[in-house]
């Protein structure tokens, strides 16, 4: 990776995740199931956003590691449950058998439950960083942020999975509500939690948290639109999971909400460009400290898997 690659921080994040799992006192089978899901790779977008948001707000990005671990635990819990037969019924995730195929449905449910509850430990103890042992007020703010995002994510999953539950008038209104919750809330929290962690070194004021929250809102919707285009246009071999499943299941996607076909895809790309511009505009206050976030936005707008 080049020095300017925003994903060059992945080895540090992976070490923190692996170290956390190795210290878990939850029994061998459950620890192995959590490790199978949590340590199986992936983009690590949410912890990468938290890391670079902390840096953009003037903090030491190492201080964001508890938030990085917490966010990835919640994200992986959501993937494990999303893959279950009662939900999307997927057999493949990140190029590997999904957890319920690997370890059984009961263990997948329980491992997902465990990851959701374990996510709050790094924010309230020294499990990842000794600095968090005595940071009560900051820990409470981070926990509240993660609780709100996790609850919104689950609400969005309800809207997406159970027909007729999503509020809004037009299909475009409804799909935006679904993914502001299901996808966008945790991405927004990744940015605001990273900015909050910058306060450990005396940076990251409320204006920084607000700007990075708005940045996260734009990135979250942009990410989902691109994800829907990938699901529509890319082969499963490239993506590492089954594609074309959302439309096949009758789910509302951004291309369909925009009318479907080539015209729907074109309108999606126009919306991606608008959201990209909004995200970059929110980074203006941070100057060069946000260059990694700018590079990340460029990557997310054009990714193919």
Image: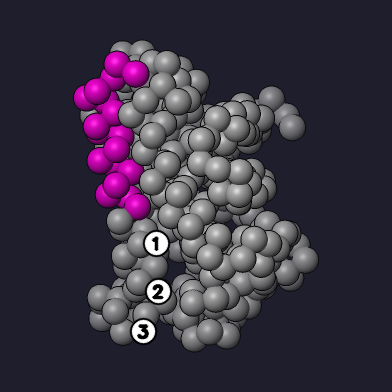
For the view shown, which residue lies furthest in the front direction?
Answer: 27
The foreground one among 192 and 255 is 192
Q: How many marks?
A: 3
Is the magenta region chiefly helix, strand or loop? Answer: helix
Cα distance in 3D space between marks 3 and 2: 7 Å
Callout 3 crowding tier (Cα within 10 Å): few <14, some 14–19, many ≥20: few
Image height check: is 300 above or below 133? below
From the viewer's perspective, is residue 98 above or below residue 265? Answer: above
The quadrant in which residue 204 appears is: top left
Q: Which residue is mark 3?
A: 163
| Residue 273 located within the stretch drawn in magenta | no
Question: Could you say whether the residue bearing mark 1 is in a helix, strand or loop?
Answer: helix
Q: Residue at x 66, y 67 (%)?
A: 101
Q: Are marks 2 and 1 in contact (CB under 8 Å)?
A: yes
Cα separation between marks 2 and 1 = 8 Å
- How packed is label 1: few (under 14 Cα within 10 Å), some, or many (20 or more)? many
Residue at image position (68%, 62%) is 102
Say which of 78 and 244 sits in front. 78
**Residue marked by disc 1:** 182
Q: Which residues are magenta?
A: 133-150
Q: Which secondary structure, mark 3?
A: loop
Residue 191 falls left or right of residue 90:
left
What residue is drawn where x is 36% and y is 38%? 120
Say if residue 202 shows up in the picture: yes
The residue that mark 2 highlights is 160
Q: Earlier in the sequence, mark 1 or mark 3?
A: 3
Residue at screen point 40% across, 74% down = 160
Q: Residues within 10 Å of mark 2 (few under 14, many from 20)?
A: many
């Amino acid at each position: 990776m080049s020095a300017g690659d925003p994903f060059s921080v992945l080895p540090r994040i992976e070490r923190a995740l692996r170290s956390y799992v190795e210290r878990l006192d939850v029994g061998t089978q459950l620890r192995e199931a959590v490790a199978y899901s949590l340590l199986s790779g992936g983009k690590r977008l949410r912890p990468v956003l938290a890391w670079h948001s902390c840096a953009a707000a003037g903090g030491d990005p190492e201080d964001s590691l508890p938030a990085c671990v917490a966010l990835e635990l919640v994200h992986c819990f959501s993937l494990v449950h999303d893959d279950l037969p009662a939900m999307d019924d997927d057999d493949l995730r990140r190029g590997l058998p999904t957890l319920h195929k690997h370890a059984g449905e009961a263990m997948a449910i329980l491992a997902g439950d465990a990851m959701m509850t374990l996510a709050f430990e790094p924010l309230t103890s020294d499990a990842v960083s000794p600095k968090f042992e005595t940071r009560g007020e900051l820990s409470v703010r981070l926990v509240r942020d993660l609780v709100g995002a996790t609850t919104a994510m689950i609400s969005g999953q309800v809207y997406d999975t159970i027909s007729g539950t999503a509020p809004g008038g037009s299909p475009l209104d409804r799909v935006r509500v679904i993914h502001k919750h299901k996808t966008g809330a945790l991405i927004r929290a990744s940015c605001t939690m990273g900015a909050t962690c910058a306060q450990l070194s005396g940076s990251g004021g409320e204006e920084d948290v607000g700007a990075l929250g708005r940045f996260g809102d734009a990135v979250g919707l942009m990410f989902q639109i691109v994800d829907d285009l990938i699901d529509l246009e890319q082969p499963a071999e490239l993506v590492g999971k089954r594609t074309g499943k959302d439309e096949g299941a009758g789910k509302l996607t951004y291309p369909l909400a925009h009318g479907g076909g080539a015209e729907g895809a074109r309108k999606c790309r126009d919306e991606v460009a608008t959201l990209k511009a909004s995200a970059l505009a929110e980074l203006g206050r941070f100057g060069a400290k946000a260059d990694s976030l700018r590079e990340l936005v460029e990557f997310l707008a054009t990714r193919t898997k």
